[in-house]
Structures are given as C-alpha cells and as structure tokens.
Image (cartoon, rainbow, N blue to C red):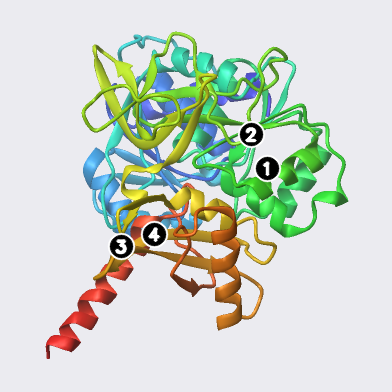
Amino acid sequence: MTFEALADDSARFAHWLGARGIARGDCVAIVLEPSRAFYVAVFGAIKRGAIAVPLFTLFGPDGLRLRVDDCKPRLLVTNGTNADMARAVQGPDVVVADDDFWRELAGFDASYPIATKPDDLAIFQYTSGTTRELPAAVRHKHQAIVVLMIAALYGTGIRLADRFFCPSSPAWGHGLWHGTLAPLALGVTTGAYAGKFDPGRLLRALEEQQITNLSAAATHYRMMKSCGAADDYRYAIKKLSYTGEPIDGATLDFVDKVFGVPVCSMYGTTEVGVILVNYPGARDFVVKPGSLGKPVPGVRVEVHDAQGRQTPHGRVGEIKVWRRGNWFATKDLGHVDEDGYFYHDGRADDVIISAGWTMSAVEIEGVLLNHPDVREAAVIGIDDKLRGQVVKAFVVSPRRADDAFVRELQDFTRARLSRHEYPRHVAFVSELPKTPAGKVNRKVLRERERATAEINSYDTDR
C-alpha cells in the first residue's frame, strides 16, 4: 500500500461515515486484522473527528459485548468471519468490509477537509486483560501522536530509511502505537502481521522483505527460537526491540547469534506510554542485556519503597514515573544499578514470600527457560501452611514428564539461584494461559489454583 492510496481511501471513508450520520465524537469499533480495510477505517474515523476503537479479532461474544457496551459505538466494521457474532451484540450497526463496501466507498471524494483539534479524542484503546473482566479504555487525544512519535524514535530507533516490521496486533498498545500510528506518521515503510502467528512465517518475511528494524513482543522472540527455522534465512536486521515482559537469557543468546545485534527493551504502560528504553541503533549507548535501559529524555523515573522513598542501587521497589505533579505507580517492581540502568523484577503481585524469603517469579522463570528441555515456563506462589507460600512452576516441554525431570528442574534452579529459590511444585502443561497481547497470564494460573484449593477444602470439610 502507498501513503497516497491510504490517504485517498481514508478520506472516502470519512465522507462515507458522514453520509451514514456518524458525527464528531461518535465511536467506530473496528474488528479487523491488519489490512487495507483496517487502516482505512482507523484513519478515516480519525479524519471524520469520530473515535476509532480497534478491537481484538479473536474476542469471543462476551469479550466483544463487554467492550461494545462500554464504549457504545454507533458503527462496527468487521469481516465476514466475525459478522454474525458482531450482529448478535446489540447496539451498533454492523458493516462488513467486503466487495460491496469497497464499491460503495469508491463513490466518495478522495479528499477530506480536516477540522480536528489537538485535544479532540481520537482513539479508545482497551488494555489486554481477560475477557471476563473489562479493562479500562485509555482515551487518547489527537495530540498523543506527537508523544508517541518521539517515543518511537527512542524506543524502536526508527528512522526514515528503515524497513520496519511489528508483528503485534494493532488491537493492543504495542501494535497500535509503535507498530502502526507512530511509524506511519513518521513516513516509514511499515510491515504488519495478520492471522494466527507462525514464527517461521515471520522469519521468512524478514528475509523476503529485507526488514532492517523489528519491534516485537518477548513471546515472539521466544517462539522464533523454539521453532528451529531461524538458520534457514538471511537477514538485514540492524535494530531490534521488544516489549511486554522480560526476555530470558537463552533467548537473548539466540538473538545475538542469529541477528548479530542486541535486542533492546522498551518499557512502558498503556496509561503513561514508553518511559524506559535502550535506544536501538544509538552507537553511543551501551545496551546491558536484560535491562530496561534508561529514561526517555524529559521523563523522570524512579524506584520507590513501600514508604514512597527512592530506593538505593540494587534495592527492589516499585517503578514510578513523575506525571502531572505526582508519582504515578506502574505496579511493576524493579531496581536501578550503579550506572542508572533500570531492571524489571516482576509485577507487584508476582512477588512470592516463602518462610520470610522474598522471591521473584520472573527470576525463577528466567532460570527455568535456560533449561534446554523447557519451551515455556510460568511461576506463581501458592499457599502453604508451613511457609506461607511456596513456588509452583508450570512448564511446557516436549520431554516426558516424570519425577526425575521434576527433580532435575528443581536442582537446575537451585544451582543458579539461592538454595531456597526453586519450585517445590512442578506441573507440566500443554500450553500456558496468555493475555490477548501474548503475555503469560499468571493471574489466570493463580485463580485456577485458588479455585482448586477451595474445592479441596470443601471436600475435606464434608
């Protein structure tokens, strides 16, 4: 697609919205994979002065209904696959982006008079929670694009000459802002991924499209490592970045071996944007493997203890950012080293306290993922009458599960961390629950364990 074609088609879509009575400030839900229709609908709605609401194409009826009931769109644009489900959600008019849609759009003018202002609402974006809960919709104004363009310059290292690719879904923050809006606003050639993720397909695309700058989720890099196809292709990669969660040591080694450039963390939240980066492509910045990097210029970030005091170097606390005259809590734990680099130590609710010892689920997972027979791992704390909590690990592995493998994983972890930091319980599973954005969902694991414990308690009481 060319920028000119996108500009023309989105202008036609803006006129088309007006003809259907969609006014400034009305919400337009968009349930589409990255495609011509997706980009035209998003940019056309914004041109009209309406509010674009990208929604995940794999939502079930409940997940879609929750968000539609919340933002109350006048119109929902989708494909034939999701049309029946969308129509079952009462409220918006449902339009399918099919051949008839494009023929109708062709009858409208390819230019549109822009009348939006910087503080007009442009996009509602839902965070990646479970479909049983309704995560808050973050309301972005038109002026947000300026902040995101600057963050992309630092976080992804994007420049005009890049051939950029982001496989994350534009229903979520990374794929929407850093994979779509920021690079296109900067005039950069941009690739996107539609359909079920296949790491081999992505690797092939990196070669065929001669991609020089890749920004992906940590999960994407792990899947590229596990698929075994990375050595089948040749790459033009010069800059790499990731977000969403930390990358384990084995995956970092894989990236160095295959691509020959460091993969740079880009840390932030949907609410505050990107605040810590490793400046991909910057020759004067030393990338420390596993670190979140340093603050984006103009942004103040600190790690605080429970009393709100800044922690000394190496001490774990909560990552906070100075915003609008107050310290905003990210709900992520971290620490800062003596050189000013920030490190992630898990979510605040991912800390496990066992017999007085404080352990990090992220750190234990990182060790387990270094075992050659572990493809994926997730760690939570479960209740224990003696120790308060103990560590339970959920492991995905091609190897046969038995007691010997459990003891091997326990010894493997103890040998690399402290003697008390190991999973006392190991469960082998075929897959781990993940958020729609691809992050391991430890909350679901905790809820399952809690439900199982309640059932067992009920049986004992009886």
Query: Which residue has dot 3 on it?
Result: 389
The residue at 87%/41% (across/down) is 234
Q: Is residue 64 visible?
A: yes
The residue at 55%/19% (across/down) is 339
Q: Secondary structure at mark 3?
A: strand
Query: Which residue has dot 4 on it?
Result: 380
Q: Quadrant of the C terminus?
A: bottom left
Which one is earlier in the sequence, the residue at label 4 or at label 1?
Answer: 1
Q: Mark 2 near mark 1, Cβ–Cβ under 8 Å?
A: yes
Q: Residues within 10 Å of mark 3 (few under 14, many from 20)?
A: some
The residue at 60%/76% (across/down) is 405
Q: Mark 4 near mark 3, Cβ–Cβ under 8 Å?
A: no
CA–CA distance between discs 4 and 1?
A: 23 Å
- State the mark number for residue 252: 1
Residue 65 coordinates in the image, percent (x, y): 28, 53
Query: Which residue has dot 2 on it?
Result: 289
Residue 443 coordinates in the image, percent (x, y): 34, 56
